[in-house]
Image: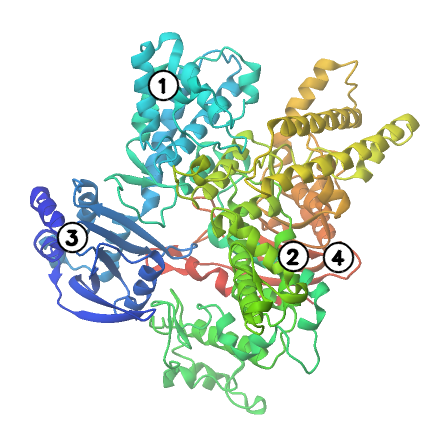
Amino acid sequence: MGINLRYARELLREADLQRLFVEELGWEPCYKTITLTINDTIYSMKAIAEKKGFVVWVYESPDDILPERDIRLKLDRKLSEVSFEHLIVFITSDKTRQLWMWVKREPGRPMRARSFVYEKTDPGDHLLQKLQHLYISLEEEESGISITHVASRAKAAFDVEKVTKRFYDRFKKEHNRFLEFIEGIPAKDDRQWYASVMLNRLMFLYFIQKKGFLDGDIDYLRNRLKMVQQLHGRDRFYSFYRYFLLRLFHEGLNKTERSPELESLIGKVPFINGGIFDVHPIESTYEDIQIPDEAFEAIFDYFDEYDWVLDPERTRKGRSDKEEINPDVLGYIFEKYINQKQMGAYYTKEDITEYISKNTIIPYIFEQAKAKCRVAFENPGGPTVWDLLKENPDRYIYPALKHGITWDVHTDSPLEKSLPLPEEIAQGINPPTLHQPVGEVSTINEVETIRLRRNWNKPAPPEYALPTEIWREVVARRQRYEEVRTKLVSGEVRDIHDLITLNLDIQQFAQDVIANCEGPELLRALWHAIKDIKVLDPTCGSGAFLFAAMNILEPLYEACLDRMEEMLKEEAAKYYDTRVKYTPHGYPELPHGRMKDFTEILEKVASHPNRPYFIFKNIILNNLYGVDIMEEAVEICKLRLFLKLAAQVEPDPSKPNFGIEPLPDIDYNIRTGNTLVGFANYKQVLKSAEGHLLRQQEIEQIKLKAKELQQFFDSFRHRQLEGDGTVPYKLKKELRHRLAELNHELNHYLAGVYGIDPEKKREDYASWLKTHQPFHWFVEFYGIIHDMGGFDVIIGNPPYVEYTKVKDQYTIKNYQTEKCGNLYAFVVERSINLIHEKGFMGMIVPISLPSTPRMSYVRNILSQKSKYLWCSNFADRPGTLFNGVHQKLSIIINQKDSKKQCVLFTTSYRHWYSKNNKNERLYLMELVKYLQAI
């Protein structure tokens, strides 16, 4: 029969949630109350309804302020110990505001809180649409349902990805419709590109207008369209696009100085910078572009169906009764919309990007810190960072491995005591080696062994087992836990590489090392290693791996700054107040210049809008680099990074520029070009001039120009990090001009390698430039490639495309792996040559790399140029790492060192389930087990 919407709406408005669930949704009433203590504050949680063990909890706030997100998550975690599957509703004392929170647990991704805010003034229809998923009919009750069914209903109700899918399906249609409106761009590819550019700009503005950045009007674009039409008439000279939008983009958001006439037109809007609103190359090429008002009316109608939320983790008033869209959607749209699968690129889930990123970035940071503060790592008879592993080993063992021993993955909480194995299982473990028979070797009785282990092939209950585990696997996992824990307790693990091999929680360890720094020397060494690391994704797409790298680096930055602050306070307390001066933001200036650099760093951070903004801006400008052959990919990647920064600040109209800094210009971090075509280093440029004395002299001049350009660029970047971050446009224009000149010269030399004379065959040269899109690493990243010897870390998911499929578009030159015949092998070779000695690389590639004869060339390169090489291998059935794609895969991680003999570690060929209640994918990466190859 379903629910009575009119009555349900009334119950929701009155916050009578027990009657809503019992009378309208068919649940049973519940009257349990428990008190939870978080940070010395007591929270009374009331269970109001339940169905098959799935419980609805309510917390009524004593005032009109709801608990902050971190408190809500802690409450959720504690409630999981009482009722693993549940939903929590937080209500203000006046019952005018509700926040519904459900925690999403999805295979291959970290747990996430999905929140929905309901205001009493809202109609509530969208929330009620969600709650209809939780309706249980009498027929369903009689036929029998379980907690699994109820949990799946909750997922269907609150799963944001379903909203994202609907948004994407509509986006395809609206993109094509918008494309048809564009006039003045005859080239189809350019027209498609410009449609994407415009929609990207408009989506960015929708996010920031909903936060109040555009004249304080959350419907700014819609209202300005109406204003222009009232002033000039509908579609008069295509007025909204030419009269308003282009001026808003190029003169308003992209410049600090504005005429009174422009101010009157666009209102009070911030100077955005960042390059997103620069005059686009297509706008320069085609000066008569026209887009009628109808196109924008249709797009605004579509966008207005959703709630555009920059930071979904922050609750705020005024949330509309619409489905939510957040910046993560942009990556999803890009990955799906451009049909990446045809290009051999697949969406990489977060468990993979996180695993690769943390196991390359953190080892590099520790290697660098060790070089500057060796005593913290090697101190015979004294304390070292490795003592943390010895003192608290379980802290660094992943929950999946210790499930049923010291941890319960179902409640995500520690066990009070380990669960002993049942006698009928334990009797088969003697000696403890799993695959040896019971008893002494001299008295082997295989029949007796089989008898004692007759129950080992039966499924184990969930308190002991992970999904699908039988007792034999439980026993093996427990033995693995004991092996790892024994190594930690004995102090055997004293090298960062061992944390990869043993698959320990390397990120938790890194944060703990920083938090427990006893002296400034180690903290200083770690800080410099973190802030100076250069991470590249050579085929970055919409930025999945770059965002994973950001998520690894951000808490490390935060931990360093926290520890600096603590150290300064601890040291200042040792002096009389008269001997310690303080900075304008209250940081101690210690006598004798002690820890002066910490004071300066913290004071610099305090001069920015807030600490998260400072951290993310530094990561984006100093740490992250990406290249992709697709312009759209690069545009989306930059857009997502910009939105990440914009999400960190709140608009303040009383302050200059709404209290925000201009976005950094990351055009020189995230670049468009063909990773495989172009000069990687100076040696390759010289080789192109062999036998040409005059050309060799010219190339020497190019090197000098490249060095000068790098100095100019360093100054450009430094200015973006100092003060308000503003850089005069003429400096950027000069930088572009110099870079274009150098690329022009190098393109001429490279064309010669391809047998093309740019002067005599200009049409052939122009065609070659368009198809090959050369990218000269030597010039684009001169300081990194030439001065540093290469990037510190390279991560990514290269395209899996047969060379024969792209050979009619572009060809490669001088690759040892050309006979491998697949682009991913070429990307691996290029990446190895772009990392400096001691750098780390991590990629997910087809399993053909470690297993087929054709890939012997790339295997040889990896083994010859690696000190350590880890290879984990994954099947494609029944579960697959890429959704909807059956691709057998391997993850390779290596540290480069051409002078060392390679030490290889590998895993078994792993199978898993990832559907319904068989969510093995959730624990897949936590159970990676390496063995050293002989």
Q: Which mark is residue 528?
A: 2
- Residue type of the residue flagged with mark 4: Asp
- The label nearer to you, 1 versus 2, is 2
Q: Name the residue under label 1.
A: 295
Depth check, front residue: 437 or 667: 667
Percent across and percent down for residue 372 are 71, 64
Q: Which mark is residue 897?
A: 4
SS at badge 4: loop
- Residue type of the residue flagged with mark 2: His
State which tag comes first along the sequence, 1 or 4.
1
Count residues near mark 4 (Cα–Cα under 10 Å), then give few for <14, some for 14-19, many for 20+. many
Q: Name the residue under label 3.
A: 95
Percent across and percent down for residue 687 are 84, 35
- Residue type of the residue flagged with mark 1: Ala
Depth check, front residue: 543 or 372: 372
SS at badge 1: helix
Percent across and percent down for residue 309 are 35, 41
Q: How far apart are marks 1 and 4 (CA)?
A: 56 Å
Residue 470 drawn above or below residue 646: below
Dots 3 and 4: beta carbons under 8 Å?
no
Quarter residue 487 falls in: bottom right
Percent across and percent down for residue 885 are 46, 44
Depth check, front residue: 40 or 570: 570
- The label nearer to you, 3 versus 1, is 3
State which tag comes first along the sequence, 2 or 4.
2
Q: Residue at x 70, y 74 (%)?
A: 378
- Residue type of the residue flagged with mark 3: Lys
Q: Tell whether 886 sits left or right of 832.
A: left
SS at badge 3: loop
Q: How far apart are marks 1 and 2 (CA)?
A: 50 Å
